[in-house]
């Protein structure tokens, strides 16, 4: 991520075609229920995160994340669904409530969550 992008963005969101690998989300050849449970456990275990809503039927987990330095509250939405190949897909969005730039905080938050989820589902094949 370039310096200008870090200062001018306040949202990070995964997409299958994202140019940066850490923003591509994940697809697991694992049952939805297993990935849902792992994602919920991971969100609850994330440092400075509070899960505020979980709707399994919609495949949505919402959380608030506090920034370390000034304690700003940011919003995180995790979406779990089945893709066109029958894999369980995990995508997320992290966005700042305040300010125009986040110095890369949201991108790092997305990457840390996905890395932690990968570890929790270790042994399951991951597709990016």
Image (spheres, rainbow, N blue to C red):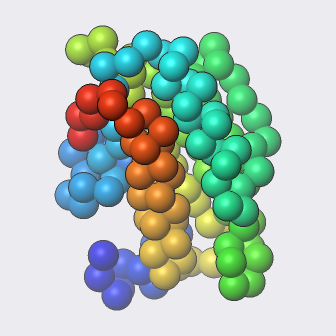
| Depth order, front residue of 86/35 | 35
Residue furthest to the front = 123
**Residue 104 spot, x, y in % from top left:** 45, 75
Query: Is 90 on the left or on the right of 73, as rendered?
Result: left
Residue 98 visible, this angle? no
| Depth order, front residue of 118/103 | 118
Q: Quadrant of the C terminus?
A: top left
Q: Residue at x 63, y 14 (%)?
A: 57
Query: Is 124 on the left or on the right of 65, as rendered?
Result: left
- The part of the image, by quadrant, that contains residue 15 is top left
- Say if 65 sits above or below 105 in the image: above
Q: Residue at x 33, y 28 (%)?
A: 124
Q: Quadrant of the N terminus?
A: bottom left
**Residue 103 spot, x, y in % from top left:** 49, 81
- The part of the image, by quadrant, that contains residue 126 is top left
For the image, the number of numbered tags is 0
């Amino acid at each position: 991520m370039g310096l200008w992008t870090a200062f001018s963005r306040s949202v990070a969101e995964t997409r299958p075609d994202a140019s940066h690998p850490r923003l591509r989300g994940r697809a697991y050849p694992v049952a939805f229920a297993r990935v849902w449970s792992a994602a919920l456990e991971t969100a609850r275990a994330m440092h400075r995160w509070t899960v505020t809503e979980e709707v399994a039927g919609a495949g949505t987990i919402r959380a608030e994340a506090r920034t370390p330095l000034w304690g700003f509250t940011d919003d995180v939405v995790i979406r779990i669904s089945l893709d066109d190949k029958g894999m369980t897909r995990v995508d997320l969005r992290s966005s700042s409530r305040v300010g125009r730039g986040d110095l890369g905080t949201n991108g790092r938050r997305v990457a840390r969550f996905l890395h932690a989820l990968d570890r929790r589902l270790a042994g399951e094949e991951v597709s990016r």
